[in-house]
Image: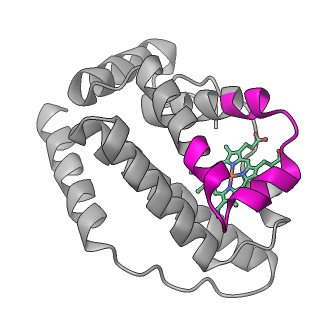
Amino acid sequence: MGAEPDGGPERRQLLTLDVMQRTGIDEAMIRRLVHAFYGAIRADAMLGPIFGARIADWDRHLARMCDFWSSVALMTGRYHGRPMPPHMRMGLERGHFDRWLALFEATARRECPPPAAAHFVERAHRIAESFEIGIAFHHGQTPPARRARPGWLAEAADERAATASTA
Ligand code: HEM
C-alpha cells in the first residue's frame, strides 16, 4: 500500500498537492472523517460487535486508519500494513460490506464537502470490492458481481472527468 507511484517522491508530492487542491482533503479532514466513521461503526448493531470483539486499543486503530486513508486519498505512503488478511478471518458477507459502505458514505457526506466525499467514497467502494473478491477466492468461490450503485458510479465518473481535465 505504501508503493511509490511511477516517478518517485517528487511526483507523488505533486499528486498529493493536486488532490488536496481539487478536493480540499487534508490530514485534519481525514482525522475528522475517520473518528466520526468509527464512532458510527461502534454504535452500529451489525458492525459494532465485530469491531468490539477484535479491537482492544481504539486509539491505535484510529491512528492506523488515519494513516491508511492518508495513503489512499492523498498518496502520502503513511500506511505500511496489509489490510486484506484480517478481513479474511471474520466471516464477512455482502451485507456487512453494504452496511460498512452505507455508514462510510453517510459519514463522508456529513463531514466533508462534496468533492472530498466523492473522492473518499469512490475509493472505499473499490477497496471493499477488492476485499470481497479476495474473500471469495480465499473460500474457493467465484465473487458475485457487485450491484451497480448509480449514485456513486455517476460521481466517480464525474470525478474521473474532472481529474482528466486537470491532468
Ligand atoms: C465488511 C466490513 C468490515 C469490517 C467488519 C471490518 C472490520 C475490521 C476489523 C475488526 C479490523 C481490525 C482487525 C485487527 O486488528 O485484528 C479491521 C482493520 C482494518 N480495516 Fe476493516 N472492516 C471492514 C471493511 C473494511 C473496508 C471496506 C476497508 C477499506 C476501505 C477496511 C480497512 C481496514 C484497514 C486498513 C484495517 C487495518 C489493517 C491493519 O493494518 O492492521 N475495512 N477491519
Q: Residue furthest left?
A: 165
Compared with 49, 28 (above or below) is above
Residue at image location 59% in from the left, 29% down from the top: 66
Query: Who is closer to the viewer here, 10 or 156?
Result: 156
Percent from the top left, x then y, of residue 15? 36, 24
In the image: residue 143, left or right of residue 33: right
Query: Who is closer to the viewer here, 82 or 51?
Result: 51
Percent from the top left, x then y, of residue 96? 63, 71
Residue at image location 75% in from the left, 27% down from the top: 59
The magenta span reads 39-62
Compared with 55, 61 (above or below) is above
Whether residue 119 is visible here, answered yes or no, is no
Prevalent SS, magenta region: helix
Residue at image location 27% in from the left, 56% down from the top: 156
Residue 164 sits in quarter: top left
Residue at image location 19% in from the left, 32% down from the top: 167
Task: Indicate yes or no whether the magenta region holds residue 118.
Answer: no
Query: Who is closer to the viewer here, 93 or 39?
Result: 39
In the image: residue 63, left or right of residue 163: right
Percent from the top left, x then y, of residue 80? 72, 30
In the image: residue 48, left or right of residue 125: right
Compared with 67, 90 (above or below) is below
Task: Indicate yes or no whether the magenta region holds residue 56.
Answer: yes
Percent from the top left, x then y, of residue 53? 87, 55
Whether residue 128 is visible here, answered yes or no, is yes
Total numbered badges shown on the rendered structure: 0
